[in-house]
Amino acid sequence: MTAKNISLLDNFIQNIIDEDKKNKRYQGRVHTRFPPEPNGYLHIGHTKAILINYGIAVANGGKFNLRFDDTNPIKEEEEFVEAIKEDVAWLGVDWEDRLFFASDYFQELYDYAEELIKKGKAYVCDLTSEMIKEYRGTLTEPGTESPYRNRSMDENLQLFRRMRAGEFPNGSRVLRAKIDMSSPNMNMRDPVIYRIMKEPHHRTGDEWCIYPMYDYAHPISDALEGITHSLCSLEFEDNRPLYDWFLENLNCPEPPRQIEFARLNISYTVLSKRKLRELVEGGYVDGWDDPRMPTICGLRRRGITPEAIARFCESIGVSKSNSIVDVAQLEHAIREDLNRRAKRIMVVLRPLRVVIENYPSGETEELEIENNPEDESMGKRKVPFSREIYIEQDDFRESPPKKFFRLTPGREVRLKGAYYITCNKVIKNEKTGEIEEVRCSYDPETRGGWSADGRKVRGTLHWVSANHAVEVEARIYDRLFSAENPEEHDDFKLSLNKDSLEALTGCVAEPEVKKVEPEDRYQFLRQGYFCADKKDFTKEKPVFNQVVPLRDTWARIKARG
RNA sequence: UGGGGUGUCGCCAAGCGGUAAGGCAAAGGACUUUGGAUCCUUUACGCGCAGGUUCGAAUCCUGCCACCCCAGCCA
């Protein structure tokens, strides 16, 4: 599963495309685009849009463009275009040589505006923004026409050229489409299409002092690139009549068709640029790529693969109903992916010392353990075993609850790939009563974790030889918010989960960990999937991020009591 | 009170007049050198509500109801 073979053949958009192909509309061509505004980082919501656009193009033998919607110089920065390109490429999406910018079309856009003026379809309006707002009317009352609405074509043209020449101050005049001030659709009440902004643009510098609005630039950019199906989110449904209006009035051969679908929401997180920015700027997280962030760079740093993201997007479908997808569905896609591809390694997160009393001290033997039981081709590795080992604190209970299958006094359990051991004694701190060490004996006949007499053991534990242990840090993440839908609260930050990060230092890993490189992913046996941190991991101080824990049936039994 | 949308299992989501797919979650069981994975099994007599058309309706008609979006010189 990669972005390239994502299966998006069964949704309402594909149905529309099938119909268009049957009718030979657009000569059977399919050409989509993803039009981000370079004013922030991409998140998993954008990923859905990217993959739908790209997936639809690929599935139909069509083309896909990446186009930056950079029509507002005061909000946009070059830094973001580079970051967005990197994120989109990382997803496995290939725009080939079709990287565009709305700003590439500033001249054409300007020329089309003159065309509109000449056709009497646009006029220069001198109303202030406050007045324009007043004249627009309300949802239930029609607007009133601007006193400048009926200027002559010549006057409009002169004025517009002077706007372009920089003769007027910011905000003093705008170019408006002449449509219908009494339309029930607010977008059709003579929308502004050009505004004066004496601001340098990240690509065109100070070449322009007037900039087109989205509603005007978008349909034309689509048409200029030969886009056939312009996919966008639901809130643009009311803009579609305007999208069509520009293209109808502008001599466009076969106008692209705008189709809207519901954007992605996921439980226990927020997916809006503004709110994510607030988290970063307020120091609630460690940056845009904090592993708890739903940003693409955050997901990447967390250790989620592009394939898992693609699988997830495929699984949620495409529709027009507003919905919140359960984060468990994302986690499922991640586990499904990593189970297949991640090597297993043993790491004890919260170590408890175990001394195997009948094992010769000073001796070490190497045991062979498979790297991934799901995939024999991933081979085996050697793991050292000796008299003193560490096991997980949770894997020992002095007085075990019901259905506890792990180590407990007098019980025999298996050490993964090693031996059966039986607990003989518990050593506690005299003052605190805390368990400090457990004394066991092993059965030399069970080497490899198997016994010839066929005797059964219920529990299998992961372990690390004390003398060979490598210290590592493991960062355990929980959901960023404790509310299922943080957005429905007055201040979404109030539902931030204070325990979303727990940094575990003093974890111990088997020596295999020395081979790990940043961004490598492993299953820490019996615990979860972990990814070597892209930024903080070093050979000297290995740092891992928990991608997602393994499903934990025992935890559920325990929780149920 | 205007306009545009959406309402099918706890969460997504097919369905396009012929008698409710699938995934996630949940529950039970099998198997297991990860209480992981895998494999079985269970979960909508009903499709927002109320009428109507039809031999037959989630699908067509009428009327309600709920929720989302729109009054930036943002996108």
Image (spheres, rainbow, N blue to C red):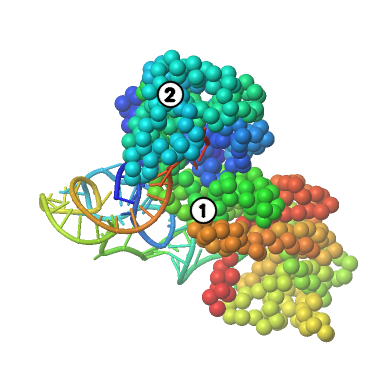
Where residue A221 appears, x then y in whole percent?
49, 25
Judging by the rendered image, the residue that carries numbered circle 1 is A266
Which x, y percent locates residue A384? 80, 60
The answer to whether marks 1 and 2 sit on the same chain is yes
Q: Answer left or right for A37 relative to A223.
A: right
* Residue type beneath disc 2: Tyr
Q: Residue at x 58, y 80 (%)?
A: A402
Going 65% across and 61% down the picture, which residue do you hit? A500
Hey, which residue is sitting farthest right in the picture? A362
The answer to whether A487 is drawn above or below residue A295 in the figure is: below
Q: Helix, strand, or loop for circle 2? A: strand
Q: Chain of mark 1?
A: A
Number of numbered discs overlaid on the protein picture: 2
Circle 2 residues within 10 Å: few <14, some 14–19, many ≥20:
many
Residue for point 76% across, 58% down: A473
The residue beneath circle 2 is A123
Regarding residue A343, the answer to whether it shows in the image is no
- Using the image as rendered, state which of residue A270 and residue A441 is in the foreground: A270
Question: Residue B8's quadrant in the figure?
Answer: bottom left
Q: Amino acid at mark 1?
A: Ile
- Kindly identify the residue that appears in the image at 66 percent across and 32 percent down: A78
